[in-house]
Image (cartoon, rainbow, N blue to C red):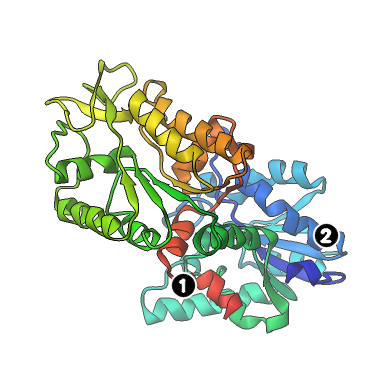
Amino acid sequence: MIDNYNFAGKKAIIRVDFNVPLGAQYEVTDDTRIRGALPTIKKVLGDGGSAILMSHLGRPKSGPEEKFSLKHVIPNLSGHLGVDIQFADDCMGKQAAEKSAALKPGQVLLLENLRFYTAENKVSTDEEKAATRVFAEKLSTYADVYVNDAFGTAHRAHASTAVIADFFADDSKMFGFLINKEIKAMDKVLHHSDKPMTAIMGGAKVSDKIQVIENLLDKVDNLIIGGGMTYTFIKARGGEIGNSLCEEDKLDVANELVKKAEAKGVKLILPVDQVLADTFDNEAHTELAPIDQGKAGYMGLDIGAKSVEALTQVIMDSKTILWNGPMGVFEMPSFQKGTVSIAKAIAESTAQGCFSLVGGGDSVAAVNKFGLADKVSYVSTGGGAMLEYIEGKVLPGIKAIRG
């Protein structure tokens, strides 16, 4: 455990998740993930160790690209840590090895984007897997200790998230504080939740959440469905949805999930009304309508006031809440009311003693946008990883250290 480990005189190579959004001038526009990594980095430095940080940024296609260079995060990171950050402009180059070797206690080295090398994340063929092992072994030579603190990539069997652990002894590889907090928060929701427990699943597609919902049906008392995926359920039960988003090939799946929820005594709750729009635009003409009375040429882009009232009541009566996915197109002010209202209800319920876990890119963006991130119990940094963990899958980045 990182709490009990003394990093004095040790070089720790830390897999962080600095895959952060950058603005037009390459400035960090949301540093949630950087702030999430700080406790682990500070522990290493505070013990008298040195930190070598590695991460990916974006999805570079073939080699280095200026817009995906990790050097852009240095001003933000340096400001938080209060130390100068050294930089190796090639994670595999001679410079990276030399700077790592020369690193003194209290110093920090940031390696350039790991994904400038396909060996970091291309692991489909035997040849690619072999290249990944070579890549991971090279990274391991920079340090004495490996710390994985990047929960957002823990569901990938990549060089820096899983394979590198093979090159460290059991007592020289561990999770950072962030991953420990993520696992603790999710295990509380999945295995030690106070009842009643409510899961709120939003977003566009049922297909993205089928396994998650299946697994949650054994754990929750209430399952609230929102966002675009609502309309697949509504059409499946014979409702009119107009031009709203719908997965025609998942109508049977939606009906099956409703039956399974009923059989397990889970209340599956759908919105009762909606905000319709004639175009996908903030300035669109809008109308209120019951959820199953869509209109030709119109699409549902948010839940209505009656839905907000009903869902808020369920949320306020809950002792544990898991929220993944918005209620509507909250990025547009005209269609953000449903998502804002649900976020505020979760915050209020949390203030009254409920444990709330918010995860998934859009949900996290919503609580950040509306200034509510510190009003919920835990905000997960890993969307895909969180969903796979909830599905019950073994995450390679977790298994590599837990065994």
Q: x, y (%) of residue 56?
A: 55, 57
Q: Note whether 385 is above or below 1 in the view shown.
A: above
Relative to 394, say whether 87 is above or below: above
Which residue bears the numbered disc 2?
45
Q: Which mark is residue 159?
A: none
Query: Toward which corner of the image does residue 213 lie, by quadrant?
Result: bottom left
Measuring from the top left, give residue 274's x and y in whole percent: 28, 27
**Amino acid residing under circle 2:** Leu
Residue farthest along the bottom direction in this orientation: 169
| Disc 1, SS | loop
> 301 above or below 204?
above
* Of 278 and 26, the residue lying toward us: 278
Tell me: 291 left or right of 349.
left
Q: Quadrant of residue 245?
A: top left
Is residue 162 among the parts visible in the rendering? no
Q: Residues within 10 Å of mark 1 (few under 14, many from 20)?
A: some
**Residue at x 45% of width, y 41% of height:** 362
Residue 131 spot, x, y in % from top left: 48, 77
Q: Amino acid at mark 1?
A: Val
> Residue 6, can we see it?
yes
**Foreground pick, 368 / 55:** 368
Q: Which residue is mark 1?
A: 394
Specify few, some or many for label 2: CA neighbours under 10 Å numbering under 14, 14-19, or 20 or more. many
Distance Cα–Cα, label 2 vs label 1:
31 Å
Q: Give the image quarter of residue 325.
A: top left
Residue at (39, 25) in percent of width and height: 332
Quadrant where the N terminus sits is: bottom right
Label 2 sits on a secondary structure element that is helix
Q: Position of residue 254 (x, y in %)?
A: 22, 52
